[in-house]
Amino acid sequence: MKRTVALPKLEIRIHMSHLTRQRFPVPFDRDQVAQDWIRRGYSCDLFTDPLGREWNDFVHVANELVTVMDGRLTHGGEELIAKLGDEVFIPKGVSIP
């Protein structure tokens, strides 16, 4: 099963090849994101992390799509930052150091 989340406030560093800039228009419409992801075979759940949350040694068990509703997203060691409306693909098996 594919997993997707819309993250309100989180910072994750990501790899450039997994980032689609401005995939969704701002102001953010969660229903539009949900419809898009469902059409592509993903679910859409709202997930909130507290500011500064770190997922050390976490391994993604399924492919995931993530978009930022508020704040920024960073993943791994890359310095690239996802912003409002950007979409991030996180492949199954990727770990967060």
Image (tube, rainbow, N blue to C red):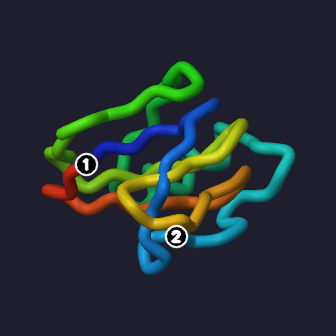
> Residue at 66% of width from left, 38% of height from top?
30
**Label annotation for residue 97:** 1
Task: Name the kind of residue labelled 2 in the image.
Answer: Leu
Q: Position of residue 85 (x, y in %)?
A: 70, 55
Whichever of callouts 2 and 1 sits on the residue coming sooner in the sequence is: 2
Residues under numbered marks 2 and 1 in contact, where contact means CB atoms less than 8 Å apart: no
**SS of the residue at dot 1?**
loop
**Label annotation for residue 80:** none
- Dot 1 surroundings within 10 Å: few (below 14), some, or many (20 or more)? few
- Image quadrant in which you'd find residue 3: top left
Q: Position of residue 83 (x, y in %)?
A: 69, 54
**Label annotation for residue 19:** 2
> Residue at 51% of width from left, 52% of height from top?
74
Q: Position of residue 86 (x, y in %)?
A: 64, 60
- 27, above or below 46, in the image: below
- Image quadrant in which you'd find residue 59: top left
- Whether residue 18 sits left or right of residue 25 in the image: it is left
